[in-house]
Amino acid sequence: MKQIFVNLKRFDVPRQLGGVCPQHDPLAWIESVIAQSVELGLGAHDNLALTYLLPEGLVPTAARRLAQFPIAQRKMLAVGVQGVHWDDVRPGKNFGAFTTSVPAVAAANLGSAWAIIGHSEERRAKMQILSAYDATIATNIDARARAATTIDQLVRDEVQCALNAGLRVLMCVGESAEELGEGTFEEQQPRIEKVLRAQVTNGLQGAERFLRDGKIVIGYEPIWAIGPGKVPPGREYIAFVSAFIQRTAHDSLGAKIPVVYGGGLKEENAALIASIETIEGGLVALTQFTGEIGFNVAQLSAIVGKYLA
């Protein structure tokens, strides 16, 4: 089963307020996105599942709109949330001291089927918080490594909370430019492996009982290549990394876990990504990158078509 995830970041904020939602009412917009997705047949593929990862405020509206369509038309469409807290609400325990955080139980109750966890933006935010309390992180390699381990452990706790709440998890991993370092690809490989081995094994620790039915997918983000003007990795690089992630996950949990490409699945690279045997899908952020950046369901459908061709 192939998996495509669409991470609609600040589509809860209209353009006139600084976001990227093309309509003044983001709730009406996400309803139209769901409806168009169904109308274009994106929920009826036999071998490809499509998940919209949304800001928390858009999840209930999207989930309700999706549920209004016949199951046959939406069977492969799902809605997810863009992260959960590393602790959760429990009967008889903490009933809700999670101001500003999204407990996994709440995300599931609002209509989420998935959660994206460990995204590069989330990891960066956690590193910024830790750096504010430890100035040596910015200059000391050992301190930065300890901070990265702490972040991996928080990601692990988030993964556990999401899985325990019945959510499926897209766990993201990836190396930064600093971690990649200089030199040839052969010289970089041991450094890449060190970073990804730690992120995968730490993040999935204790997740053995959730391996059935595709509850966990790993998203590979080449952080050093994401952003305007950056050169994406080639086929050899992605194939090497995705194969290593699969081996590492298997060694850690004893099972095959799907890996999707999180560096930006686009119409231009969809065929290339689809040709890599150890990649089973991708992560879409935008479909329009020039002029007024944004997202268009018809353009997403074109990406899906190129990927499945």
Image (tube, rainbow, N blue to C red):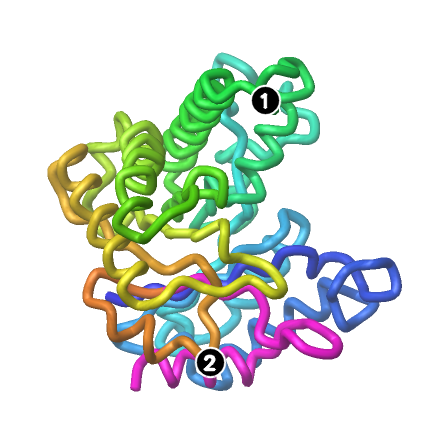
User: How far from the left and from the top, in percent, is residue 128?
Assistant: 64, 29
Q: Is residue 63 magenta?
A: no
* Nearest the eye: 247 or 182: 182
Residue 71 higher or lower than 87, as above or below: below
Give the number of the disc on residue 125.
Answer: none
Residue 299 covered by magenta stretch: yes
Q: Which residue is denoted by mark 1 in the rendering?
A: 139
Residue drawn 43% across the image and 42% down it = 181
Distance of label 2 from label 1 (alpha carbons): 40 Å
Number of the front mark, 2 or 1: 1
- Is residue 234 in view from this perspective? yes
Quadrant in which residue 13 is drawn: bottom right
In the rendered view, would you say 181 is above or below 154? below
Q: Residue furthest right?
A: 16
Q: Dot 2: what SS?
A: loop
Please identify the quadrant where the N terminus is shown. Answer: bottom left
- Stretch in magenta: 282-309
SS state under label 1: loop
Q: Quadrant of the C terminus?
A: bottom left
Labels 2 and 1 touching (C-beta < 8 A): no
Pointer 2 or 1: first along the chain: 1
Of the residues shown, which amino acid type is indicated by label 1? Thr
Q: Label 1 neighbourhood size at 10 Å, few (<14), some (14-19), many (20+)?
A: few
Expressed as whole percent of the image width and height from the top left, the position of residue 78 reads 44, 61
Q: Residue tagged by mark 2? A: 267
- Look at 74% across and 65% down and name the residue there: 20
Q: Amino acid at mark 2?
A: Glu
Q: Residue at x 34, y 80 (%)?
A: 271
Vertical comparison of 110 with 271: above or below: above
Q: Is residue 244 left or right of residue 105?
A: left
Taking the image as shown, residue 263 lies to the left or right of residue 30, namely left
